[in-house]
Amino acid sequence: MTKQWVYLFSAEKTEGNKDMKDLLGGKGANLAEMCSLKLSVPPGFTVTTEACLDYEKNKKSINQDVRAQVLKSITEVEAMTGKKFGDNANPLLFSVRSGARASMPGMMDTVLNLGLNDQSVLGLAKLTNNDRFAWDSYRRFIQMYANVVMDFNVSLLEATLEDLKEARGVHEDTQLSAADLRELVTVFKRIILEESGESFPTDPMEQLWLAVSAVFNSWGNPRAVKYREIYDIPHSWGTAVNVQSMVFGNMGEDCATGVCFTRDPSTGERKFFGEYLINAQGEDVVAGIRTPQPINDFSKNDSNKHFKTLEEAMPAAFADLTTVYKKLEAHYKDMQDIEFTIENKKLYILQTRNGKRTAAAGIKIAVDLVSEGILSKQEALLRVGPEDLNQLLHPRLDPKAVKKIIAKGLPASPGAGGGMIAFTSEHAHAMNEEGKKVILVRQETSPEDIAGMVASQGILTARGGMTSHAAVVARGMGKPCVAGCSALMVDAKAGTLTVGGKVYKEGDFLTIDGGTGEVIEGLVPTIDAAITDDFATFMKWSDEFRKLGVRTNADSPEDAKVAIKFGAEGIGLTRTEHMFFEKDRILAVREMIFANTVTDREKALAKILPFQREDFVGIFTVLNNLPVNIRLLDPPLHEFLPHSEEDKKELATSLGLDLKAIENRGEQLHEFNPMLGHRGCRLGVTFPEIYRMQVQAIIEAALICADKGINVYPEIMIPLVAVEGELSLLKSEAIAEIERVFKEKGKKVKYKIGTMIELPRAAIMGGSIAKHAEFFSFGTNDLTQTTFGLSRDDAGKFLPEYVSKGLVPNDPFVSIDQEGVGFLMRHAVTEGRKANPDMHFGICGEHGGEPKSIEFCHKIGLDYVSCSPYRVPIARLAAAQAAIRNTK
């Protein structure tokens, strides 16, 4: 039986549904679903993602079965529409659009009006009795096709269009006459031939095959690859191609095109929101070339409030759109982003998808849908991506700060940010690489600007509406965006921004407020984001369903306070070495390193002891009633030595040594591979007095806090254990020191001693090591390094190539390598529990805040994850989602 590569969609016959996104892509699956709902969707067909992968496998060739099924589908669409593809008198025209499983707005390519040529354009003009419409459609088709399919430098065509408008004394494309557009088509084709040596194709079937191939190829274009890397979308998925019969929003004043959202995508308010343009086509609304009009009063803003709403201009079409949006939101149980076209007052729906939204809007929508009885709490929790919470946890402008507002645009994506002006994506990226904070300032953004948008603190555009490319992508990234700021005169070539007569240059500072639309001169201070009631409710639901505990990695009381505010249930990692680097104690640490006898080392350590004890008291006080896991000294001693000549001289003077002695000690401690050298528990074995001092400080701090009525649960973690004997020895020495302190102070506290599993051997020998441990905490940063034999600091030079070529599914330092590192973790947990059923298990590497890694930790039965303070809410939600998805 021949494989099905092509799926038809129409009101009469539809072969797919919304659950077929893997095969039909999101757009194709939703087109099929809307057809089954009997909505007014122009008929067409979807070429599957499997055909895209087959195309790649066959050296970029469309196989014969695919071609045959496309031709059959065209015949069926012709029968439904009463038009014929390639016919000169009554031509059937197509749009050709990409459609990946995951929404990738603007990242791949689209062609509209496919099928037109010098003969059929005349037929279209006669058929519609509208010369201007026909030639406008042809002009658009040549421009898009040249760009997408022929890889032509389309700026040459755009410049020609601008020159013609200037010559005619008009500002808008819509003001050009049919004769102007006919002349433009002739000039466009001549420029393409002269510049490329290729004639513009006139055979509709050739146009179609080349366009389908171009959409398949666009899966691999740089901006699409970059977008997938940012949003962790697998490169192996491929894209579907949707070939849909054209309906026209550019036939006259009773035609329009638009984009709408069933709720406000910035705030989540239950208000219908959108923009449209009369006598326009597809890309015009999102391209930002013309200021779009509001669909209703709620959609009005400063730039469009004087325009007629769609409700006023076309009340019947607006009423139909209202019925459709309510039906779609109820069906999909989520806020929808809908594209529509109105042709001769008749409404057509071209696309629906779950709308991109800010994190604040996402949480409000999820909470509201539960209160409206549409979603369960579990369903609502699955609707918000854990990483999206990042948007809510970052600063906003200090309301008390003095602000010099120089312009105001549309508040397209909330949040605030400031930095140096960069006028191009390339400059923004380069400046960010130099450690500079950047605001990307553009006339309007395009998909090619994706790298610059990622590198920027925020995006500011002179053109575009609330549904422009800049607005949609910025919202998805959680970056502030001010769009459609018409007061700006941006000259990227000259590197200037002119506002109210004042000229700003690249490198000057601006601040933008994406919540108000304000553009502010200079840098404005920021304050922490506020936690809303909806956020608190949503996180409370997360805690109801998650099984994993969530702790934080914190080395100071300040970090711990932030984490507790965000819902941390303890500390999973306190790195004591970070405390050693403080200015008032580093000298004592260095004195300890230069000591030649145990006695001298103990004298130096005695100076450090009060500082360590004070640090632990501070942390224990914040963590009242919660566990605190403290890792004993881990890095090699040479890391504490001075590097600059000035610091070396200062140390020599302080210790009464000559400079040569300082340098000699540095050479003695130098290691060829310090990651695998004299560090962790190996320091405790060779210099037991160091660990004794730290254990003493921990227990004395715990006793001090207990006296104040603060409940303390210290967990002492011995790092880098590889053999059972290391833990057995160091644990017995720690217990001896603890008992000494208990006896001296005449009181006790509860404590635990365990180890950090960060070496493959430790994981393999988990059963024997567990006999001496009360907990295992996986240090997955080092476990990944030692399992792969990779240096985390150097792997960035080549690992991206491994990911892009599919050699590894993800960067293993970002998301746990579940096959290799994960195998070791699962083994250590299984064997550890067998040997010691009372043990608890956690993770404290960077993976502890990464959603896919958290789900893996849930599956292998860890008790908690630990992450940086600002990722605590992310971990809480990811843990809840893991529990919901894996409920049997």
Image (cartoon, rainbow, N blue to C red):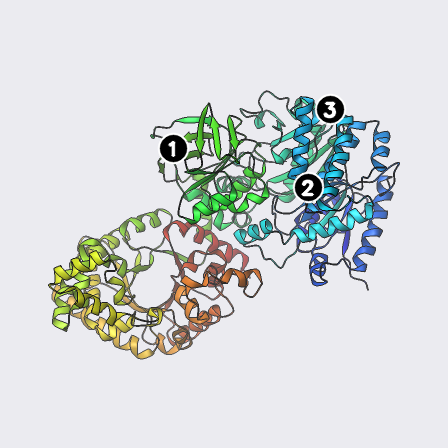
Q: What residue do we see at 14% from left, 65% from top?
A: 658
What separation in Å lies between label 1 and label 3 (alpha carbons)?
A: 44 Å
Q: Name the one closer to the observer, 720 or 643.
A: 643
Q: Secondary structure at mark 3?
A: loop
Instruction: Give the vertical position of 170 relative to 109 (above or below).
Output: above
Mark identifier at residue 355: none
Sequence-wise first label, 1 or 3: 3
Q: Residues within 10 Å of mark 1 (few under 14, many from 20)?
A: some
| Amino acid type, mark 2 | Gln
Mark identifier at residue 253: 3
Sequence-wise first label, 2 or 3: 3
From this viewpoint, is residue 346 visible?
no
Q: Are marks 2 and 1 in contact (CB under 8 Å)?
A: no
Q: Residues within 10 Å of mark 3 (few under 14, many from 20)?
A: some
Q: What residue do we see at 16% from left, 60% from top?
A: 651
Q: Where is residue 687 shown, x and y percent of the image?
A: 21, 72
What separation in Å lies between label 2 and label 3 (alpha carbons)?
A: 23 Å
